[in-house]
Amino acid sequence: MNDKDTIAAICSGVGGAITVIRISGSGALNVGNSVWKSRKTLSEDTKGRFLLGKIMPDSSGIGETAFAVFMKGPNTFTGEDVVELHAHGGAFNSRRIFNAVLNHGARQAAPGEFTYRAFINGKMDMTQAEAVCDLINANSSMALHLAEKQMEGVLGRKIKSLQTQLIDVLIECEARIDFPEEELDFKSREELDKEISLVQEEMLNLYETRFEGRVIREGVRVVIAGKPNAGKSSLMNLLLGYDRAITTDIPGTTRDTLEEFINIRGIPIKLIDTAGLRDSDNVIESIGMQKTISSMETSQIILWLLDASIVDLKSETTEMEKYLGGNKNVIAVWNKSDLLADVSSLPPVDYDAAVISVKNETGIEKLLDIIEKKAWDHPHEKEPELAISQRHAEHLKKSLSFIPDVQNNLRLENWELAAISLRQMISCLKNITGEDATLDIYATIFSKFCIGK
C-alpha cells in the first residue's frame, strides 16, 4: 500500500441516517476545507471540535448542512492528520459527497488501509490490528470480548515478554562468544536451561489456546441431517426462535440447504438444515441429498435426527450408520420422544445422544450441553484471556521447533549455535507482532478488512 497519499472512505453503513467520511493523510486538512465550508475553517486552532457548516459537493453553490472535525496527527487512530465529515445519509448522497472528496485530491482507501497506517505509524502492533478485524466480524459476546482484549494489547504484551526472556538468554550466549576469557558473572548452563524450559512452557500454554481461537473467531458448522420427516427443519426453527424453514408432514419438503447463524452458549454456530436422505428417483430431491452429503463432509458437528415414534427403532440406527460410517463428530438426536412410551426402549448408539421432543420443546438443554462440549472438544476456559489465531499458532509452532536445538547446544556449550536458534525463535515471535513480517504478509492480513477500516 502507498502510505504517502491522502486517503478517504465512507466509514458508516451505506443507506443510514448519517454518513461519516474519513480522510487521512498530510493533505486531509486541504481536502476537508475544499469540500466543507463555514465561517471558521478547519485548522489546528479548531482541532478536536465539531464545527457546523455546509458541504459543497459540486459547483452549483447549493450545499447541505454537515459537521466536520479535524484531528491532528500523531494523536489520531492512523497517526496522521484526519478529517471526518458527518452529513446526511442515504446511498446516493454519501456517494456524491465522497466523489467530491476524491475530486479534491484524496484517493479511495484500500480495505484495511486506515488500520494499516495505524500499524506502520506505531499506533498498534499487528496483533492489535488483527483485533480490529476480529471486532468487526465478531458473532458472539465472547468473540467481542476477546477482540477487545487483544486490541488493548494483551496478546502483544505476552509475545513481547517471551521475546524479552529469549533475548536475555541470547545476550548470555553472545557474551560468552565475545568474551570467552573474561571472568564475567555468567549464568550456569542449568540456569539457562531452566529459563528456556519456562519460556517453552509459556509458549505451549499459549499455543494450546488456538482451539479456543478457532471456535470463537470462526465458529462451528453444525449440520442437521437424517431421514425425511424426522423433524430437522422443525428443530432448526426451534433453535433459531422463528420459522426459517418450511415444515410439512410431506416427506422431502426440504430440497436445498438452509444456513443461518446462531449463538449457542457463547459459540457462534452456522446451523445448516438439509434435505432428508433416502432412496429417491426424483431428480431435484437427489440434487438436494447430494448437497446434504457435501455439507456433512465439511461440518464440524452433525446432528443426526432419529424418529423415536416408529415401531422399528433399530432401522433408524441402521440407516444412520449407512451414511455416517463411524464419523465421531456426530450427535444422535432421538426426536418425537413425546410419542414414545418408554425411553429405555431406544436402542444404544455409538455416539453422543440426546432425547428430545421438538413439539413439546423438551430435552433441548441437554442437546445444547452436548453441542457445547463437542464444539470445544477439549477442556477450556469459559472466557479465555487469550486465544490465538491460526496465523499466530503457525509462528508459535515454528518458534517452539527450535527449542530442542537451543537446549542441546546450551548443554554442550555450543554458544554460537544456540544463539543462531534463539535468533530464529525471536524472529518467529516478531512475525506475530509484525516486526519481522514481510509486505506480502501485510497485504494478506489487511485484505480481509472492509473498506473504511
Image (cartoon, rainbow, N blue to C red):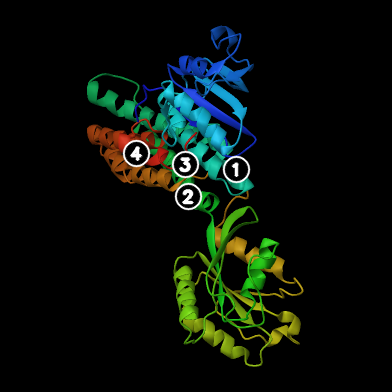
Residue highlighted by disc 3: 202
Task: Tell me the mark number nearer the camera, choosing from 3 and 4.
Answer: 4
Q: Is residue 16 above or below residue 66?
A: below
Secondary structure of the residue carrying tag 3 is: helix
Pointer 2 or 1: first along the chain: 1
Q: Are marks 3 and 4 in contact (CB under 8 Å)?
A: no
| Residue sitting farthest toward the bottom | 311
Secondary structure of the residue carrying tag 4 is: helix
Pointer 2 or 4: first along the chain: 2
Secondary structure of the residue carrying tag 2 is: helix
Q: Are marks 2 and 4 in contact (CB under 8 Å)?
A: no
Is 423 on the left or on the right of 376, as rendered? Answer: left
Residue 93 numbered tag = none
Give whichever of 277, 245 is nearer the camera: 245
Give whichever of 254, 30 is nearer the camera: 30
Secondary structure of the residue carrying tag 1 is: helix
Q: CA distance from mark 3 to mark 2?
A: 14 Å
Q: Quadrant of residue 239?
A: bottom right
Residue 210 numbered tag = 2
Residue flagged by tag 3: what amino acid is it?
Glu
